[in-house]
Amino acid sequence: LFGINQSNRDFTKKSSWGKNQFNSSFPAALACYMSCKNLQPVYLKLNHDLTVNHGKIDVSSLFGLHYDNCLDIFMWSNLAFTRLFIDAAKSELNSDKITRHKRCVVWLAKMLYDFANTSKINHTATIDEISLNTKNDKAFALSGSKTHQYMKSPELTKPRIKQEEINNIILGGGEKLLSPERRFDAIILNTPNLFD
């Protein structure tokens, strides 16, 4: 993968191209490739009114290195990311049911309370001890229709990295090692002539 020279994954081995490994490694390679082309990822952050705003961020400030445009990347600040589940929980206030979104707000409040009192956060204990009768298998999930309001931008409707540039990011025949199920890796593998 482009720009990933130091990794605990060996991309010459098929096991490093499984769905979870590839889908978590490709964004880093994409960031390197965008930096190589002097494109800054979209940075979602909160303004003073606690609403999500768009900015740009240098890949070098994320990785501590200088790189240069591909599909596109949206980076979220920690506080901007909290708006995803806080706003979803606000839309569920008419219900007494504890949803995953509401539980995430409770977890966040508990972790911030702990941090204010002890300067430490034990997220594992918070998640294990505060289930609120909801399965702990995942925090929350949001569809693209919910995240669209935060991400709508020219970069979302017209990403800056073109499809034919993917082969500049996935190097050395790595696409042949993919084992796709659905998602992005399946699209890459099933797009004709992408790596010709």
Image (spheres, rainbow, N blue to C red):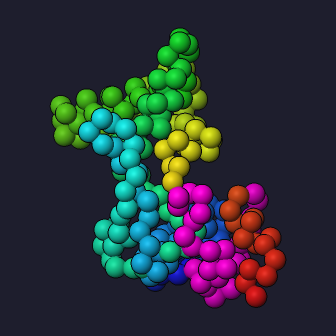
* Residue 10 spot, x, y in % from top left: 56, 79
Quadrant where the N terminus sits is bottom right
Q: Check the image and report above or below for 145 versus 33.
A: above
The structure residue drawn at horizontal position 57% and vertical position 65%, both measured from the top left corner, is 159
* Among the 4 quarters of the image, the one containing residue 157: bottom right
* Residue 17 spot, x, y in % from top left: 65, 71
* Residue 167 spot, x, y in % from top left: 64, 82
Whether residue 21 is visible, yes or no, is: no
Task: Pick the residue in front: 167 or 24.
Answer: 167
The structure residue drawn at horizontal position 66% and vertical position 74%, both measured from the top left corner, is 163
The structure residue drawn at horizontal position 53% and vertical position 65%, both measured from the top left corner, is 72
The structure residue drawn at horizontal position 72% and vertical position 70%, both measured from the top left corner, is 188
Q: Check the image and report above or below for 83 versus 175.
A: above
110 sits to left or right of 135: left
Whether residue 90 is visible, yes or no, is: yes
* Residue 171 is a magenta residue: yes
Quadrant where the C terminus sits is bottom right
161 sits to left or right of 105: right
Task: Pick the residue in front: 26 or 115.
Answer: 26
Task: Pick the residue in front: 33 or 17.
Answer: 33
Q: Check the image and report above or below for 111 versus 44.
A: above
Task: Pick the residue in front: 101 or 48.
Answer: 48
* Among the 4 quarters of the image, the one containing residue 61: bottom left
* Among the 4 quarters of the image, the one containing residue 23: bottom right
Furthest-front residue in this view: 154
Magenta segment range? 154-182
134 sits to left or right of 43: right
Q: How many numbered marks, from 0 up?
A: 0
